[in-house]
Image: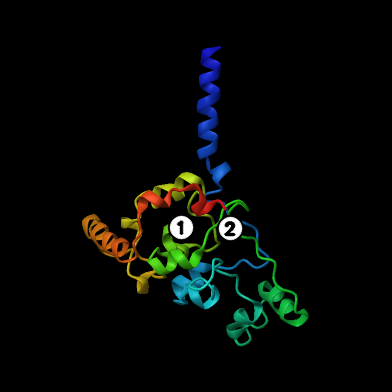
């Protein structure tokens, strides 16, 4: 019986950490097979061109159809794969993108606070510039957030580098030293960042 209970406990722990539960590496079906690799990696489009509210709002925002059409009114105008984009523009109905980085309703997350303190896009979204189709790069589970909140220094970079995909060419000591200066400048105290009310309001 004790072995059964131990096996059940270990199995439950492994399930909670599995990619099935966290959806890490899973690709969501989308109405248009949008490639961040092409748009960000190959063409060099900055994250903020499409996710316009990421610096000012708690939500990064999904691009409206007219953002897509600034280019696609001239490029690949007859491509079948872009028919949902053209229909969206014609009808005024937004494209129904499936969120990849969806958090539960009981979690309060503010993009602007993180971005404005120097938390880079790749910290949560991974190397989006290398994804032909978008998948979840990190397990958006409580432990993932707490690990960063309890030791934010190595995860911070200069604000102008936040949307750069490649990590800074810094040693671990340099990352920590820079992050600690940012924490001091913004009065970031890790002792308060794992308070439940920070994320659960």
Quick check: can you spot residue 128? yes
Q: Residue at x 59, y 68 (%)?
A: 34
Instruction: In this rendered view, identify the residue nearer to me: 164 or 173.
Output: 173
**Local secondary structure at mark 2:** loop
Q: Residue at x 63, y 82 (%)?
A: 69
Residue 197 vertical position relative to residue 183 in the rendered view, above or below: above
> Measured from the top left, where is residue 158 in percent x and y?
32, 70
Q: Residue at x 71, y 81 (%)?
A: 89
> Measured from the top left, where is residue 135 in percent x and y?
54, 57
The residue at which mark 2 appears reads as 100
> Relative to residue 166, is residue 36 drawn left or right?
right
Q: Quadrant of residue 172?
A: bottom left
- Farthest-out residue, top: 1
Looking at the rendered structure, which numbered label has been put on residue 158? Answer: none
**Local secondary structure at mark 1:** helix
* Cα separation between marks 2 and 1: 11 Å
Q: Residues within 10 Å of mark 1 (few under 14, many from 20)?
A: some
Residue 72 vertical position relative to residue 24 in the rendered view, above or below: below
The residue at which mark 1 appears reads as 124
Instruction: In this rendered view, identify the residue nearer to me: 185 or 101.
Output: 185
Q: Residues within 10 Å of mark 2 (few under 14, many from 20)?
A: some
> Measured from the top left, where is residue 112 in percent x and y?
48, 68
- Farthest-out residue, bottom: 74
The quarter in which the N terminus is drawn is: top right
């Amino acid at each position: 019986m004790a072995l059964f209970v131990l096996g059940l406990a270990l199995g439950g722990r492994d399930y909670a950490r599995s990619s099935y539960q966290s959806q890490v590496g899973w690709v969501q079906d989308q109405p248009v097979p949008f490639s961040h690799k092409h748009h960000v990696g190959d063409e060099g489009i900055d994250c903020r061109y499409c996710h316009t509210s990421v610096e000012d709002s708690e939500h990064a925002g999904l691009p409206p159809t007219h953002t897509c059409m600034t280019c696609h009114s001239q490029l690949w105008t007859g491509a079948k794969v872009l028919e949902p984009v053209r229909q969206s523009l014609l009808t005024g109905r937004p494209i129904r993108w499936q969120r990849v980085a969806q958090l539960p309703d009981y979690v309060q997350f503010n993009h602007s606070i993180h971005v404005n303190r120097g938390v880079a896009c790749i910290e949560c979204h991974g190397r989006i510039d290398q994804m032909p189709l978008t998948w979840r790069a990190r397990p958006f589970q409580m432990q993932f957030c707490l690990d960063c909140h309890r030791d934010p220094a190595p995860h911070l970079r200069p604000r102008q580098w936040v949307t750069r995909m490649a990590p800074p060419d810094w040693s671990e000591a340099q990352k920590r030293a820079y992050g600690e200066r940012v924490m001091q400048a913004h009065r970031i105290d890790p002792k308060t960042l794992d308070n439940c009310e920070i994320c659960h309001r």
